[in-house]
Image (cartoon, grey):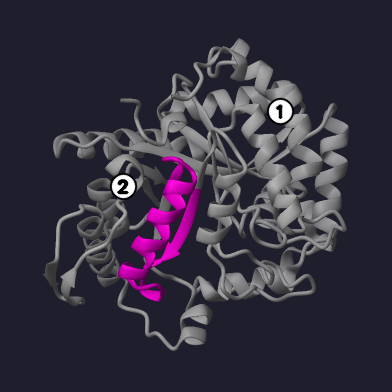
Amino acid sequence: MPARNESLHNANAFKLGLFGPNCSGGLAFTKLPERWDPSWSNNLRLAQLADEAGIECLVPIARWKGHGGATKVNGESLETITWACGLLAQTRNINVFGTVHVPLIHPVVAAKQMATTDHVGQGRFGLNIVCGWNQDEFEMFGVPQQEHDVRYEYGAEWWAIVKQLWSGEGPSDYDGKFFHLKALEALPRPYRDRNPIMMNAGASPAGRAFAIHNSDLHFDGCERLEDSEARIKDTKQLAAEIGREVQVWTAASIVCRPTQKEVDDYLHRVAENADWEAIDHLLSVFGINSNMRSFQIEKLKHFREHDMARSILGYAGGSFHISGDPDHVARELNRYHDLGFDGLALHFVDYLGEMPYFVQEVMPRLERMGLRQSPSARPSPQ
C-alpha cells in the first residue's frame, strides 16, 4: 500500500512548497501594486500550476486579523481547512496543509473537518499545528493566551485528542490537564485509516521538543543560515532516539530575474515601497520594541538591500531570502540542501507573476544538480 501524503515521501532529495498564498500580500510587507491578491481564482490557478510543476505542497497562514498598515497586510485571508478542501478537490498530486491555531478551534470539530478534507484529497491533506502567538487574534476571540511553554502542553493534549478521535476506537473518554471529554468518537477516519502528516514550526526549546515528539515535518531555522546545520542534525538525532523520523524545512522569499541588475532594481523598488506601519505592528505583536522606521529609504545606504528585503519580503525577518539570476538561486537552494534541510517553502510578492519563471528556469537546474526529478519522470500516484 503506498504511503499517504505520498509526494512528501518521494525521491526528490530537496522538496519544495509554496507558503502563504491564502492571505493578502502573502508574507511581503510591501505597497507594490503587484502584491498578492488572494482571490479564490488566483489560489486555484496557483495550486494547479504548482501541481503540474511537481511542487510537493502548499502551506497556508492561519490569519484571523491583518497587520494593518497602508495595505492591510493579511487583512483578507481564506480559512485554511476549507481552502485546502477546495484545492484538493481540483488537484491531483500536491499536498495541501491546513493551519490550525489549536487554542481557537476545538479538537472534536477540527478532527471532523480534517478527516472530511482528507477524503476529498484522497490522503493529500496535511495539518500545520500552531500553538499560539498573535495576541491581537486571541483578544478578538476572547481567549486568553497561556504562558509560552504551557501552550505546547496544551497543543500536545489537543493533538492527542485528534489522534484518539481518528483511531476509530470509541466511545472513549479523555481526562487531561486542559480537556475533560466524554465518550469521544468520530467517523470516518482519515483516508485509508491513516493519519495526515503533521507539521509544526516551534523554534523555542519547548517548541522544538513538541515538534520532535509529535511532528513529521518541522519548520525551523536560525538567524544565520549557516547555524542551521548543527541544529538540523540535533533535531534529527533527538527524533531518532525516540524512534521517530522528522523532515526539517524552512521558508524563504524568492526574487529571481534574468540578470542581477533586474534583481537589484526590483529590491530597490521593494525597499522604496515597504509598508513600515504594518512591519512595526507585526514587531509589536512579537514583543519587539521596533525602531524599523529608522531603516527607511533615506538610510538604506547603511544596509545591504537584501537584508532589507528579508525584512520586507519575509515577515519582518522571520523567513530567509534568496535573490539573484536562475543560476544563483539554484546554487543557493543547493546550499540549503547541503546544510541538511529536506525542503523549502517558497513565497513571492506575486506568486502567479513570478512562480512560472522559477519553474521554467530554476527547477530544471535543480534537476541537473540531482536535487529533483522531472515531474514526468516520477511514478504516477496509486
Residue 57 location, x and y as percent?
A: 53, 39
Q: Residue at x 21, y 39 (%)?
A: 238
Kind of residue at badge 2: Ser
Q: Which residue is mark 1?
A: 359
Q: Which residues are magenta?
A: 97-125
Q: Which mark is residue 207?
A: none
Quadrant placement of the N terminus: top left
Q: On the picture, is 188 further left or further right than 329?
A: left
Q: How many marks?
A: 2
Up/down of 262 relative to 35, above or below? above
Residue 377 location, x and y as percent?
A: 57, 12
Kind of residue at badge 1: Val
The reply to whether the magenta stretch includes residue 205 is no
Front in this rendered view, residue 212 or 223: 212
Residue 288 location, x and y as percent?
A: 52, 72
Q: Residue at x 70, y 35 (%)?
A: 49
For label 2, the SS is: loop
Quadrant placement of the C terminus: top left
For label 1, the SS is: helix
Q: On the picture, is 17 further left or further right than 330?
A: left
Q: Is residue 222 visible?
A: no
Q: CA distance from mark 2 to mark 1?
A: 29 Å
Q: Which residue is mark 2?
A: 215
Snapshot quadrant of residue 17: top right
